[in-house]
Image (spheres, rainbow, N blue to C red):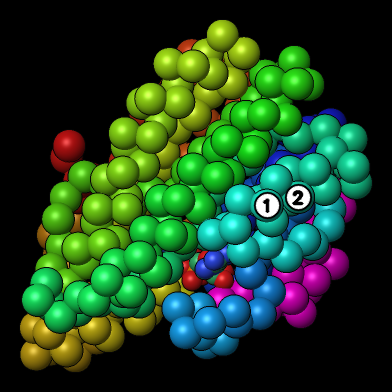
Amino acid sequence: MRFAGKTAVVTGSGRAGGLGEAIVRRLSAEGATVVVSDIGASQDAATPDAMIGSSADMQAIVGSLIAGGSAFPCDVRDPVQVRALAAHAVAAHGSLDIWVNNAGIGYIMKPLLDVSPDDWRAVIDVNLSGAFYGLQAAAEVMITQGRGGRIVNIASQAAKSGFPHAQAYTASKHGLVGLVRSAATELGDHGITVNNVCPNHVTTGLGAWQNAHFAALQGVSVDEYLIRMAARIPMGRPGLPGDTAAAVAFLCSDDATYITGESMNVSGGEEPH
Ligand SMILES: NC(=O)c1ccc[n+]([C@@H]2O[C@H](COP(=O)([O-])OP(=O)(O)OC[C@H]3O[C@@H](n4cnc5c(N)ncnc54)[C@H](O)[C@@H]3O)[C@@H](O)[C@H]2O)c1
């Protein structure tokens, strides 16, 4: 029960089978009170219903948590909503100790020359700006509380290596590497650590969409695509949501007090940098 008495917020954690749900369940299983947050409903063409966690999805996850928690809708592209999410954690549960920037979009994948300014902005707004707003809002509350804290971004293998048809995604995730390095230099004095977890492929809703896209690009079936993927990963399989959740739990624990500004690969050895 490493997180008993602590409150955690996980953005983008409403979609069933996603990394966010796994992180919520892991933190809750270790005693944290968790705020499950997601966009809740489609806001525009960049957030289609099929790709997001709904309000009902969020409530279903909260209802199944042993350690309790609450659901709070938040579009991470809006810094006002993000600050309201941080304030909710304190008002509803008494403190804010752990913040995980997990919300992300990864389905806008096109050849370089086809990427429109709207495509570019749609990805950067969620994956990079949304994480910055979350980091800033969480740090403000944690500094005021004066009891330290943990901030973790779910970056990606795309924070370390490049992938075709993923210019904005790759740039947004690389941006998180610079963000934690910079933020760590200012937040250490307050006992707040800020790190990235960099998973390789995991077949979530987002991951399944990417499997279909890359399999079609390579002219193979999704099954064949996944077999080839597993063959190049030293540990012999793609990632699982629990792999990422375990890494987040470690970085949020007292065992990781002296780790900050890092971007930790969780890739079964696939990503060496
Ligand atoms: N699945 C993978 O292979 C993989 C690998 C590396 C990193 N990641 C990263 O992990 C994170 C979670 O992805 P996932 O694979 O679980 O996919 P997912 O689609 O299940 O989760 C993404 C969540 O982000 C939410 N979201 C999207 N736009 C939002 C917004 N504006 N405000 C709030 N929430 C918003 C969605 O509703 C969804 O619940 C993402 O940041 C993704 O880039 C995924």
Q: Is residue 16 magenta?
A: no
Q: Nearer the viewer, mark 1 or mark 2?
A: 1
Q: Is residue 56 magenta?
A: yes
Q: Residue at x 32, y 50 (%)?
A: 173
- Where's residue 254, x and y in %? 62, 20
In this view, 204 is above or below 272: below
Q: Which residue type does callout 2 highlight?
A: Ala
Q: Is residue 155 left or right of residue 268?
A: right
Residue interval drawn in magenta: 51-68
Circle 1/circle 2 CB separation < 8 Å: yes
Q: Is residue 210 left or right of residue 152?
A: left
- Where's residue 79, x and y in %? 61, 51
Q: CA distance from mark 1 to mark 2?
A: 6 Å
- Where's residue 138, x and y in %? 65, 36
Indicate the quadrant containing the N terminus: top left, top right, bottom left or bottom right: top right
Q: Which residue is mark 1?
A: 80
Element on which disc 1 rests: helix
Q: Which residue type does callout 1 highlight?
A: Val
In this view, 25 is above or below 151: below
Indicate the quadrant containing the C terminus: top left, top right, bottom left or bottom right: top left
Q: Residue furthest top?
A: 189
Instruction: Give whichever of 70, 72 is nearer the camera.
Output: 72
Q: Which residue is mark 2?
A: 84
Q: Residue at x 15, y 80 (%)?
A: 114
